[in-house]
Image (tube, helix red, strand yellow):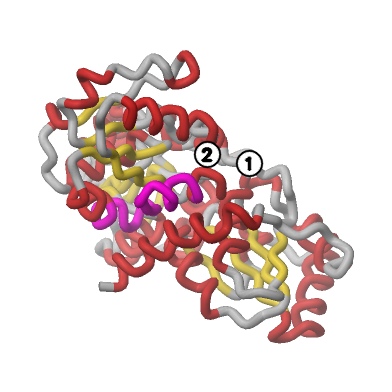
Amino acid sequence: MTTNTREHQFIEDMRQKLGKRLVILAHHYMSDAVARHADYTGDSLELSRRIPDLDAEYIVFCGVFFMAETAAILAKPGQKVFIPEMNSRCVMSDMAPAWLAERVLDTLAEGGLSVTPLTYVNSSAAVKALVGSRGGSVCTSANAKTMLTWALAKGPHTLFLPDFRLGFNAADWIGLPKEDRHIVDVREHGRAVNLDKARRAKLLLWPGQCVIHSRFKPETIRKARAESPGCLVVVHPECHPNTVALADACGSTSFIIKFVAEAPEGSVIYVGTEFNLVNRLADKYRGVKDVRPLLYSTCSNMEKVTEPNLAKLLADLDEAPTVQVDEALKDPAKLALTRMLEACAR
């Protein structure tokens, strides 16, 4: 249970003082101590959709750094975007540095392949800009099926990065045959790409993954079902396809929240995603439904954003460093994000 602290009261006082000049956004994986101060909580898609309609002077994003970069790309001129901890990186995002993604795309192009790149939102602004400049777009776990269909329709090849598990699961959802998929070898600075195998595949997958969701194994689900016969299991699509295949349902954090909400009273529900969200759901439905973590798995980078450093940021907003995106990257990155928002609004 989250208790009130001196920092809690200070943050609430600052929110009242600044009023509509301040908006705090928080990802579902934030701790309760941080999430309770948010004007809006959500997954990456929900929060991305919020940003263009915000009029606040100060936008504080509680999450990992690529999320704050996305906010900075979509923010209006004059708006300032902050994150309480600048060093809250995403390990998956760092698995696909922009220079290497560009090298791989160039190698594919030099081999005669026409490729539409599609990057998971868990990527840097530089990667989003690269994708936007090459005719591609962005996706989230909530709309990966829609955006993969969009990219494949542009044919003949799509490069999905950086999370091969989300890409593989999305391919399953749209019924893309496994023989039409190929995990790209990005070693040797992008020179190890097998062009023959790439030519035979419609979907090229970057070999990245989420270290938080990689911990959920098929045997974890088998153990849960043995301990609680008749239980329900819902997992995030960053989990391995073999894990997803054994679950009752799979979807984004927003999907998971809805799944738990709609489960019958008295259900035992195992949830395979970051622990802070699972714990919040367990508290919400305590005594009505039994919500359990499939496995205790937390994101150490999300945990770098705390109530004390949120309070410290709000104490010195006018002097605090803002999240900056190189001007040369903004337009192509925004183009990639806009393509997603437009495709998902249809």
Task: Find residue 165 and report its image quarter.
Answer: top left
The region drawn magenta spans: 129-147
Residue at image mark 1: 89
Q: Position of residue 195 (x, y in %)?
A: 26, 20
**Residue pictured at 44% horizontal, 66% vertical:** 46
Q: Quadrant of the C terminus?
A: bottom left
Residue at image mark 2: 93
The CA span between labels 1 and 2 is 8 Å
Task: Give the crowd class for mark 2: few <14, some 14-19, many >=20 residues within 10 Å.
Answer: many
On the rendered structure, is 202 left or right of 266? left
**Residue pictured at 39% horizontal, 33% vertical:** 105
Q: Is residue 226 visible?
A: no
Assess whether mark 2 and mark 1 are in contact (beta carbons under 8 angstroms).
yes
Q: How many marks?
A: 2
The numbered dot on residue 22 is none
**Residue pictured at 18% horizontal, 35% vertical:** 202
On the rendered structure, is 313 left or right of 167? right
Q: Position of residue 141 (x, y in %)?
A: 36, 51
Task: Give the crowd class for mark 1: few <14, some 14-19, many >=20 residues within 10 Å.
Answer: some
Residue type at mark 1 is Arg
Q: Position of residue 189 (x, y in %)?
A: 49, 19
Task: Find residue 223 and report its image quarter.
Answer: top left
Return the residue nearer the eye: 103 or 122: 103
Return the residue nearer the eye: 214 or 32: 214
Q: Position of residue 37 (x, y in %)?
A: 67, 70
**Residue pictured at 33% horizontal, 24% vertical:** 184
Q: Is residue 190 visible?
A: yes
32 part of magenta stretch: no
Q: Secondary structure at mark 1?
A: loop
On the rendered structure, is 170 left or right of 331? left
Task: Find residue 168 and report its image quarter.
Answer: top left
141 part of magenta stretch: yes
